Image (cartoon, rainbow, N blue to C red):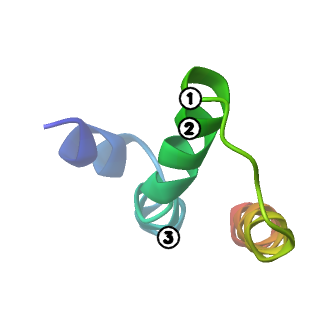
């Protein structure tokens, strides 16, 4: 339901990219709730994902 509403309100490219980044939410929850630590590879991956969001949104 929320995906359809987001697509109708915004750009399909941005909505589909953001919806594909749900693992970032899991990583943040793991950091906050379970006090997990990130490896260098995970930090690089998060950085690339954030850069991709910025590039697609512009």
User: Which disc, if any, is residue 25?
Assistant: none
Check disc 2 and report the residue beneath it: 30
Task: Give the label, 2 or 3, closer to the camera.
Answer: 2
Task: Give the label, 1 or 3, closer to the camera.
Answer: 1
Crowding near the residue tagged with mark 1, few <14, some 14–19, many ≥20 C-alpha atoms within 10 Å: few
Crowding near the residue tagged with mark 2, few <14, some 14–19, many ≥20 C-alpha atoms within 10 Å: some
Q: Residue at x 46, y 48 (%)?
A: 10
Q: Residue at x 32, y 51 (%)?
A: 7
Q: Disc 2 on helix, strand or loop? A: helix
Where's residue 34, x and y in %?
56, 29
Which of pointers 2 and 3 lies earlier in the amino acid sequence?
Answer: 3
Q: Do tag 2 and tag 3 residues touch (Cβ < 8 Å)?
A: no
**Above or below: residue 38 compared with residue 32:** below
Where's residue 23, x and y in %?
48, 57
Q: Quick check: 56 left or right of 17?
A: right
Which of pointers 1 and 3 lies earlier in the amino acid sequence?
Answer: 3
Q: Quick check: 34 left or right of 32?
A: left
Check disc 3 and report the residue beneath it: 13
Check disc 1 and report the residue beneath it: 34
């Amino acid at each position: 339901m929320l995906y359809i509403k987001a697509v109708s309100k915004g750009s399909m490219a941005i909505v589909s990219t953001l919806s594909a980044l749900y693992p970032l939410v899991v990583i943040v929850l793991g950091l906050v709730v379970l006090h997990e630590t990130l490896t260098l590879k995970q930090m690089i991956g998060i950085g690339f994902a954030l850069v991709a969001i910025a590039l697609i949104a512009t």
